[in-house]
Structure formats: C-alpha cells, structure tokens
Image (tube, grey):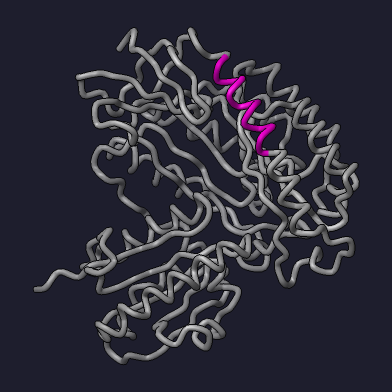
Amino acid sequence: MKNKYLYIETFGCQMNVHDSEQMAALLADKGYKLTENIKLADLILLNTCSIREKAAHKVYSELGRIGKLKEQNPELIVGVGGCLAQHLGRKFHKRVGHLDFVFGTHNIHRLPEMISSVENKREKITNVDFSKSLNSIGIYAPPANGTVSAFVTIMQGCNNFCSYCVVPYLRGPEMSRPPDDIIEEIRKLVDRGIREVTLLGQNVNSYGRTFGNDLNFTALIKKIGKISELERIRFMTSHPRDLSYELINCFAEEEKLCEHIHLPVQSGSNRILELMNRGYTVEEYIKKVDCLRKLRPQISITSDIIIGFPGETQNDYQETIDMMEKIRFDSTFSFKYSERKGTAAEKLEGKVEEGEKSRRLTQAQALQDQHTIETNLAMEGSLQELLVEGKSKNSENDLMGRTSSWKIVNFKSELELTGKRVKVKITKAYLHSLRGKIVDI
C-alpha cells in the first residue's frame, strides 16, 4: 500500500499549534504520515488565524502557491480550517477554486469523514457549524519520542466580546472540558514521557463556570498538581479581569505551577480599555501584578499590547508607555490594531493613520527590548533550574532548557539530559535567550 503524506501549515497562536497536532493524530489513524516537504503531500491542510489581517494575507499567498501544485497533481487534496475558515465558510470556495474542503473550529473531529468524501466523490465540502459537544478539543495527540512538554486544551470559546476581537464569533461560547477527561489525557502524556503541560483556552481563568459547581480553574490546577511524575504546569491565556486572587495565591501554594504568567493588558489607557470592553482599569491590572510579584518575586510577566486602537490619542499612547515603564514586562507581543469585520471596534471613529501606528509600535518595541535585555542581564551569575528540552536550535553542540519563568537557556553537555531537571549558572544574557554552565545534574 502506497504511503500517504500529510503537510500541515499552522498560522497563529499556540492553540492553533495544538489543533494541528490533533489533526495529525486523527489522520495518522487514516494512514497519513506527516511530511515537511509540501511537494510530497497527498493532503495539505492550512490551519488558519484571522486575528489580524496580515495572517489572512499569508494564507491567501500560500494557497496561491498550492494552486500550482494542484495543477501538477489533480489528485492532491487541499483543506483549510481554523478561524479564517470559520469566518468565510462557503465563500472560501469562491475565492479559492482549488480548495476541496473548508472546516471550522468545531469540526476537527470530522476530518476523516470529510477526506473520505473528497477521495470517493471529489465533492466540495464546507463544515463550519458550531457544536454543543467538545469533540474537537478532546482529541488525544501522542507526543513525539523525546518530547518533554505538551499542550492540553481545557476549554473552547469565549464570552468576553472585547470590541476588537473576532474569537467569540469564530470559536463560539465558553465550554469547559470535564476535569476527569483532562486528568486522563495528562496521565497518558506523562506515561509517554511528558514532564510539563501547558493548559490552553481562550480564557483559562473562566474554566468551570459552565459546570455550576465549585470546580474552578484553581481547583483544576491543584488536581493536576497531584499527578506524580508531572513536574511543571503552565497555562495561557488569562484575562486580567478574571484573574482571581485565589488563582494568584495558587502561584504560592502549588509548587508545580511555573513562575510565569501571560497576562494581556492591551493598553495603558483606561479610556482605551473601556472602548475595548476589557472590564478592568490599569490600576486594577497593576495591583494584580504587584500581588503576583509579592508572592513569587521571580515571576515572569509577559503581555500583549495593541497599538493604534481607534481613538488612541498621543496621550493615550503615552499612558501605555508609562505603564510599560512602571511594570517592566519580561516580554510583550505588540502589534498594530487590525480592523476585523463584525466587531464593535469596526464602527468606532478616530482611526489612527497607518504611519503613526508604525511609529508608535517601533517606539514601544524598542522600549520593550530595553526592558527585556535589562531583565536578562540581571540574571547573569544566578543559579537556575532548567527542564531540558533537547538540542538547541542554534547549535547541535548545545542543549536547551527552560527556566520556570519561561527563559530559554543554552548550555553545553555531552550527557543525554532531555527530560531531566538540571541546575545551571547563567554566564551570559542576550535579548531572546541566556547562556548557562551546568553545575548540577
């Protein structure tokens, strides 16, 4: 029997990365082997994002390239999933004639049947209906040999309706997975050598609200913390409004919970935060950051910042800069506001000119680079415990591990240490990584 090859290209966030892992796991049972060579593929899947316009442009560009492959091989099957697919639905077929099927965010579990229909009937398929089940986020994806960390999706959807965001429209309302299903999946991963899990959700702080009982996100973390051989727990993403003081205290109480939190602030202006419908003030945000740092002094705080939101004046922007100076994030993902159709922000007046957005973004990113390198330099000479992930991407002669605070550290060792925790002394700091020397195994 001829091998069938699958090529997946993922656009967007870590949730999409994990969705792609689940797609690959499903299709492995159907006989498809993953390949990194798109020219070998019998099936190509693009897992898309529509958070920003730039991501959508990349998808269309890639589909244009794939169209030429389809001309050379008419039997090639091409599918598009994810948020952009959910948004466009059948319109995607009209825009891209060589597409075979389009599937939305709630239909990953239906991939095998869609592909069978295309193989047998060569029909165009669109599946973008929302489901009341959690079938598409509970798919077990066995980790590759030698992998030490894995993603676990604990919920889907969002009820926040931030004025700039399309996620509630494309991922649907919040639904939480039963805790026993999550625990079972993590136990399977641990049995395969996983030592660190990252819990995923559009807003993990809201986990459990649909259950109507006392099982919230903090309780889930404590349950997961009891799994023997699991050494580290991370999560993303958190909404600042829903970051409870109970969860903040969990950073002091649960030793397996890593000292890192990604807490998107989006703006340093209360006026802009209100226009964004974020539900908190800068002062409330800073208070929570202060509490986190008091309980875990070494905690790494990372964030997202939107530059040039409609109505953002120079004063609003300066308030964001002032907030960055006050908090001094370890790192940020900052980007220019990108208008998305169907959101409340689309109707707001006071659009910021693109050139001005670019100027502000450049300044904000330069400031963050300064804060990041200063934070990293302060770690020189310190002892850090790493979970070793394997070979460094920079050099075959180095190993790479991460600190509990999410810092990448490269170091030399001739021993096989993947999956082990080691102590290193930080000898050199760079903007995006650290250099260390092993002192204990």
Magenta residues, start to end: 365-377
Magenta segment includes 46: no
Say which quarter of the image contains residue 77: bottom left
Q: Which of 52 and 104 is in front in this view?
A: 52
Magenta segment includes 375: yes
Q: Is residue 139 left or right of residue 85?
A: left
**Residue 300 location, x and y as percent?**
60, 26
Q: Can residue 22 be seen in this view?
A: yes
**Residue 131 location, x and y as percent?**
55, 71
Q: In which quarter of the image is the N terminus?
A: bottom left
Q: In which quarter of the image is the C terminus?
A: top left
Residue at image point 64% right, 52% down: 211
Q: In this view, does 40 lie to the left or right of 361?
A: left
Magenta stretch: dominant secondary structure: helix
Residue at image point 63% right, 38% down: 332
Say which quarter of the image contains residue 39: bottom left
Q: Is residue 215 visible?
A: no
**Residue 343 location, x and y as percent?**
76, 67
